[in-house]
Amino acid sequence: MRLIDKLISDIYLDDYFIQIFEKCLLSSAEYNLKSINPSNLTNKEFIDALRFADILSNSKEPNSRNKAYQIITSLNHNYSNNPTYRTISKAVFSMLGNYPAINFLEIKNDNFAELPLLRDFESDSKKIIQKVPDTENTFFTDSQYELFSKLSNSIEFSFSGPTSMGKSFLIKSFIKKVIKNSPPENIVIIVPTRALINQFSIDLKSELSELLEFYKYKVFINSNVSDILTEGKFNYIFVLTPERLISYLSQDDNPPIGFLFLDEAHKFANNNDSRSITTYTAIEKVQKKYGNIKLYFSSPNVSNPEIFLKLFGRETLNNFYKTDESPVSQNLYFIDLTNQNFELHSNGNIINLNDKVDFSEVQDEIDLIEFIGINKNNLIYCNSKRKTIEKANEFALKIREFAPTNNILKAVQSIKDYIHPDYYLAELLMKGVAYHYGKLPQLIRNLIEDLYKTEEIRNVFCTSTLLEGVNMPTQNIFILDNRNGSKSKLQPIDFWNLSGRAGRLSKELEGNIFCVQYDNFVWDNKEIFKKEKIDLNPTILNKVDRNLQKIEKLLNDKDISGTETEKEILRYIANIIKVDSLETNSNYKSPIISKLIEKNKTKIIELANSKTKDYEIPSFILKFNQTIDFEIQNNVYLKLKKSKGKITLPPSSQINYNTCLEVLENFYKLYSWEKAETRLKKINSLKYYAVLMNQWINGFTLNQIINQAINWNYDNNNTIKISYDEFETFDKKNKKHINIVIENTIDDIEYILRFLLEKYFNHYYQILVKILGEENAGENWATLLEYGTQNRIIIALQNIGLSRNTAIKIYQNHRDALIIIEGKLSAINKIKLLTVYKKETLEYEEIRKVL
């Protein structure tokens, strides 16, 4: 044992250290909660606390290094001008290799204290080694550098660390290295949602623009490479959802993939979401198609990151990494407004704060946010979209004075033009408040995120979109509910991922998490505050291990018990087993077949094979459509094969309401939607979806579609759902009613058109191609639904990252800025576009960032 390790071991057993460490935490709590009775350290305690921090910073163990950081951070509020603190704080942060924290001390505290000579030499040496490639003054922290070094020397790797560690930053740094490789290879980054596609691709273009140009790489966000004509040979970085990756793989002429990164890999283990199975399917198909590609997984707060590699047979002794070391400190408070009980939670210890705070003026959770969060950046987590919008409106009513900036005024006008003048978000921004959720249109999300990062708005109410990896670090997080949705509780992985957003590297040394109990909500799982090991098991393995009997029943076409979500996931897995059972004699064995063989369940494989061997539908169509019932797929194939006459869809020039309705009604019968799809089971609803589909495909703006939806509800005297069990006749003058229609319309476009219907139209088109050949298969309406247009140039503009709105406007109004050769987009005159669009428009900002 090293001497320093023995010394640190003794420190942990020292009651005096425990007392001082608690006093330091209390000092920070008093500052953050505006204490009425602050306690102070004696001069001896202050000096000893600094000594403890200095010793602990020499450790290689994350917990000790975190404690050193916490001590220095806690003391910063009261001692930032103290000469001793100034020297020791920089020395400790230097030993931790935390250069963003040193920058904070210099910029915020004017701390330019000089380090002792030896420590200064060590710091300069570390900076040389840990300099981020292709940057001037950016340096990896110690844990970042250790991870980057391991990542750089591996062809398969899985890593995990705190949310605040900067895992996306590390992936982008690694990509910088990868694109210099010879020979070059195409790269795919899988992100969990469409919302993250835009964010990650814009970051790549912004941070790697010169390298991408020099090494001839293009960033794409969809699977249709052929829509863009490129001069010379290019390679690609694709930022895709799992669904888009599966679509990419279904097209044989797409370029091969060499590197695959899965960001937010913990989603693999979400037992309540069938998309975890889709993610598995996408990666499994990449491996099968391109062999043992270079494979990487990134996840937050996972204790066993190697499990993801193990699933695909890629685990070795040294190809995974985990750390608990965080570059920012996070304080977790439990605020019980109902019982007036206030606590600080730290590593399982509870420090009572009742005699330290005065919340007598705080009546409810909205008052609390206003009181604690004044002049600070606050993200407020709510468990549903409805509650998020309601709480944002409640909070805005409390704000009496707010002076909106020019950027806010521009954003408000853009939202009114793009969505509707009565949209709540426009009114809220005038008070410095916003909301943010997954299906919020991309252009609007970008506005909110930008205004929040520049601190022009300080309070954003959010749904679980924050759990998907959206990059919105903050000073404070208020958690107003411990559920994700109306029923399921936040799991430890989700809670700590959410909490990890607190604390902005370089902008502050610490972040705060406030878990709030109030009259309308009881926090019933405080055990989650203890940060313990989080071992995950991928959903597909977990479900196979525990549900073999149910899977066998499904393979025998029998009903099973369980929630609808569980049934959906198990049906999905049963379909995967059916497809994989067709290839048990090949050299490649899918992970799920290997698992069944390992468990001596070959009978299940044989049963699955018996259910599919007589199907006439080609197995490759089943392989890429595993969420659609196989019996239904085969029946559709047989019907279309028999009636070769009129099975192609009408050409795009004939798409109108009547053709949309006719096709939807045909699909309703063909695919048994009455039984197969909850959201499509009512045949009368197809009239509404036909209207929406016609408008969307024919390029109507979102504002036009929303206005027509409002008029349609008004003209037909429709009843709309106000809450879970409350309905009212639509009133065109009622702002609440208008906003409900707006939210429903956006949701229907994103989920019904661009997810559900797109899935079925894609399947139908694959069958047509098989029966008639690609030349005779006609138009793939799935593409029209995905992009909301029939125009190939507008589709190409969206493929490189522009929104549908901006792509349509550029094509309609400024086609002379586009270079089109042989009907394909070849190049874009960015400078010209930036001169024709005003700086206050949504389009200008998007063109500046994306192109």
Image: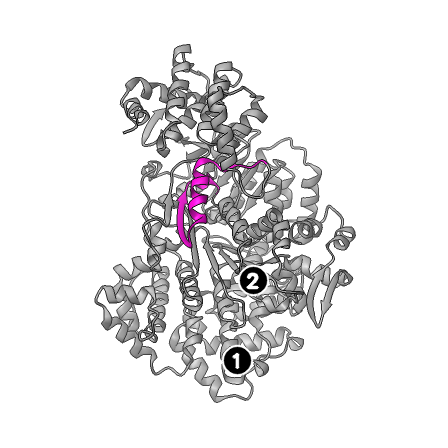
Render colour scheme: one colour
Q: What is the x, y in percent for residue 362?
A: 48, 27
Q: Does 784 sit left or right of 116 as displayed?
A: right
Q: Does 761 sit left or right of 49 as displayed?
A: right
Quarter of the image that includes the N terminus: top left
* Viewer can see residue 258: yes
* Viewer can see residue 369: no
Secondary structure under badge 1? helix
Residue of label 1? 769
In this picture, which residue range is highlighted in magenta?
137-166
| 173 within the magenta span | no
Give the answer, above or below, for where 508 lies relative to 727: above
Q: What is the x, y in percent for residue 144?
A: 46, 40
Secondary structure under badge 2? loop
Q: What is the x, y in percent for residue 172?
A: 53, 48
The residue lying toward the viewer, choosing from 614 and 528, is 614
Which mark identifies residue 411? none
Q: Does 760 sit left or right of 396 as displayed?
A: left
**Splitting the image into 4 quarters, where does residue 531 fall?**
top left
